[in-house]
């Protein structure tokens, strides 16, 4: 009824506006809308047909054989719509993504041709250590995507196997035990699906997406003859092929080790998201899957993958948040190995805020501005003394725990105010105080900070104002 009234009103308005002219659309207009409509149907039909070709089974990309008990670890309820709504996400979903780096010694029956090579090649298997671990929440209710990186050296309890580094959970019990271990570490968060992709697949995936435009933060050179691993990248903004991007993702030979690698992973992820997640990507999903399907193991159906990509293509980039498991490096001699020690109270707060997990730990930590650790990283090449007006402004507002950190290598036009520990509200308060910059909920700042201000060129436009306000 409402639709008929609206149509009548629109027709009357059109007649009044174009009095004396025919209200009937021209033949060319009718053919235009017919062509647009048929084109849309053709795209949907073509995509549906292509999907049908690769999805005769409900989970055509699953290579692991899970027992009923292992399958029960994951929530198997449907996450996408039916029919022409198949590409729509219908509820919040938590996906555990694991990046596998598998060498012949990691598996019981390595390929026979790997024995005569004289080095340890990466092999197409999913049985080794999980070098990369991400818990990703796709939430159609808040229109957000939240990615939580879990360092591979995180010290945690693996059920039935004692306290170990979390990347060993996959070796001990595959995706199900890894999901259970991650859930226990993160306050019992539910995990709906998993994806395992090996090193060979990452390179192919990035190549299939057309490479990636990213800033390499410094010169990177490393050789490991035992694995035929050769990394040779120059600093600066550049377009990386799949193989070059893999070099950037695997490099970890600096003072931050695996934590620095996680920061670079987040940089590459954001760059890939910004350049490839758009509506046209959905139509390319079947072709991309055909390129990488041998290197992926997942209990997602192809239809569910399309729903996730579709949701991602419509998500505002400011609603994509990248976090890292709060923790610290173990001290020398503290344990039998080097670990990332998780901080339970901070993890509980983060999981409540971003994943809706009800915390069993009472939060007694103050959110008073004086307790926030604020790091300042310059990206413009100015003298440290030129940052003094900025520091004074923060101090006057009650931010007293401020320190100048190592410069940010990438030149920035716009200042980044990084919520290093996931506290976007506090980062927004800092941005409001300064009156410039953009908030980023990610973990690319100083790891000892709560908020990192990465000063960009927009500082020069505001410097005089801060200079005058800081003078007595």
Image (cartoon, rainbow, N blue to C red):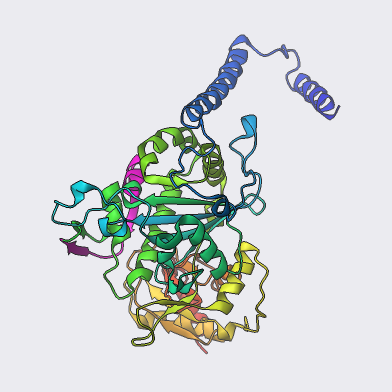
Number of callouts = 0
In the depicted view, which residue is nearer to us: 158 or 246? 158
Query: What range of the chain is rendered magenta?
Result: 202-225
Above or below residue 411? Residue 58 is above
Q: Is residue 221 magenta?
A: yes
- Residue at 52% x, 65% y is 182
Q: Is residue 26 above or below residue 211?
A: above
Measuring from the top left, give residue 416's x and y in whole percent: 46, 66
Give the farthest residue toward the bottom.
472
Q: Which is nearer the eye, 236 or 115?
A: 115
Q: Please name the residue shown 43% across and 56% down the image.
A: 98
Q: Quadrant of the N terminus?
A: top right
In percent of width and height, residue 241 lies at: 28, 47
Q: Taking 401 as reference, is 441 above or below it?
A: above
Query: Which percent across, then down, holds residue 43?
Result: 52, 25
User: Residue 177 in magenta?
Assistant: no
Residue at horizontal 31%, vertical 48%? 124
294 horizontally vs 366: left or right: left
Say if residue 426 shows up in the picture. no
Q: Is residue 24 at all visible to an observer of this figure?
A: yes
The x and y percentages for residue 40 are 56, 25
Q: Nearer the viewer, residue 255 or 198?
A: 198
Residue visible at 61% across and 47% down? Answer: 76
Furthest residue to the top? Answer: 27
- Answer left or right for 454 relative to 113: right
**Pick the front one: 263 or 89:** 89
Q: Is residue 468 left or right of residue 198?
A: right
């Amino acid at each position: 009824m409402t639709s008929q009234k609206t149509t009548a009103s629109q027709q009357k308005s059109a007649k009044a506006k174009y009095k004396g002219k025919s209200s009937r659309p021209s033949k060319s207009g009718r053919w235009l809308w017919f062509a647009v409509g048929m084109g849309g149907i053709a795209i949907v039909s073509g995509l549906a047909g292509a999907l049908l070709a690769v999805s005769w089974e409900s989970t055509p990309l699953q290579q692991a054989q899970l027992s009923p008990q292992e399958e029960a670890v994951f929530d198997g309820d449907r996450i996408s719509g039916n029919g022409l709504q198949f590409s729509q996400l219908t509820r919040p979903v938590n996906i555990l993504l694991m990046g596998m780096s598998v060498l012949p010694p990691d598996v019981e029956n390595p390929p026979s041709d790997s024995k005569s090579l004289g080095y340890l090649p990466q092999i197409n298997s999913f049985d080794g250590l999980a070098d990369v671990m991400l818990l990703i929440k796709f939430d159609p209710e808040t229109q957000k995507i939240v990615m939580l990186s879990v360092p591979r050296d995180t010290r945690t309890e693996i059920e039935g196997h004692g306290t170990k580094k979390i990347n060993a959970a996959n070796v001990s019990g595959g995706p199900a035990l890894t999901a259970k271990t991650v859930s226990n570490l993160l306050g019992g968060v539910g995990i709906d699906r998993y994806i395992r992709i090996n090193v060979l697949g990452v390179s192919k995936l990035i190549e299939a997406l057309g490479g990636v435009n990213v800033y390499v933060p410094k010169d990177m050179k490393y050789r490991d003859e035992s694995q035929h691993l050769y990394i040779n990248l120059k600093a600066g903004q550049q377009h990386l092929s799949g193989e070059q991007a893999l070099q950037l993702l695997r490099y970890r030979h600096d003072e931050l080790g695996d934590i620095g690698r996680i920061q670079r992973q987040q940089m590459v992820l954001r760059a890939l998201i910004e350049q490839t997640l758009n509506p046209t990507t959905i139509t390319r999903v079947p072709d991309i899957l055909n390129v990488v399907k041998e290197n992926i193991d997942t209990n997602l159906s192809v239809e569910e993958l399309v729903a996730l990509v579709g949701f991602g293509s419509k998500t505002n980039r400011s609603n994509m948040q990248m976090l890292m498991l709060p923790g610290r490096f173990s001290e020398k001699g503290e344990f039998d190995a080097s670990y990332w020690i998780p901080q339970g109270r901070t993890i509980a707060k983060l999981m409540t805020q971003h994943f809706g997990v009800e915390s069993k730990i009472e939060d007694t930590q103050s959110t008073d501005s004086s307790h926030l650790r604020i790091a300042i990283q310059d990206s413009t090449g100015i003298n440290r003394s030129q940052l003094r007006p900025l520091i004074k402004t923060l101090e006057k507002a009650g931010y007293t725990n401020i320190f100048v950190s190592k410069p940010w290598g990438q030149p920035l036009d716009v200042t980044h105010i990084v919520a290093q520990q996931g506290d976007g509200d506090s980062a927004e308060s800092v941005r409001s105080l300064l009156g410039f910059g953009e908030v980023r909920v990610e973990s690319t700042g100083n790891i000892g900070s709560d908020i990192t201000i990465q000063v960009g060129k927009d500082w020069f436009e505001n410097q005089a104002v801060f200079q005058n306000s800081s003078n007595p």
